[in-house]
Image: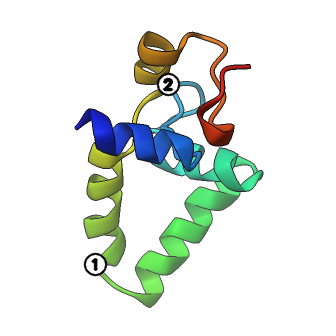
Amino acid sequence: MSGIYESMWRAGLVRAQQGKVIGGVCAGLAARVGMDAWPMRWLFLLVLIILPGSPFLIYPILWILMPGEDWVARNHGWGARYSKGEAA
């Protein structure tokens, strides 16, 4: 699992600990694309309306595959950034 976490972290996909509502997936995705978490949540709901059921599959998969900020802190230090795996 650490290999998957490492690759997701390098891609910038990290579940947020602050501002999360359920698992931090939408907040992490929003941070990755540089937007606020609430518009990302609304976009997620819009996708749910357009493609029924798909976010119910995608969200738990991302929750499992995306490392949390606590994992990043334990493995790379508190100041770690995801850009090419370098610590800031």
Question: Percent position (x, y) of residue 29?
Answer: 58, 52
Q: Give me the residue at 43% from left, 16% from top.
A: 75
Q: Earlier in the sequence, mark 2 or mark 1?
A: 1
**Image quadrant assignment for residue 10:** top right
> Could you tell whether 57 is left or right of 83 in the image?
left
- Residue nearest the observer in this picture, 64 or 48: 64
Q: Residue at x 53, y 51 (%)?
A: 26
Q: Which residue is mark 1?
A: 53
Marks counted in the figure total: 2
Q: CA distance from mark 2 to mark 1?
A: 28 Å
Location of mark 2 (residue)? 69
Residue at 74% of width from left, 48% of height from top? 36
* Relative to 40, 33 lies left or right: right
Q: Quadrant of residue 58?
A: bottom left
Tell me what residue is drawn at x 77 percent, y 51 percent.
34
Left or right of 52 in this view: 31: right
Disc 2 vs disc 1: which is toward the camera?
Answer: 2
Coloration mode: rainbow
Name the residue type under label 2: Glu
Identify the amino acid type marked 1: Gly
Q: Position of residue 38 (x, y in %)?
A: 66, 51
Q: Residue 39 placed where, x, y %?
A: 69, 59
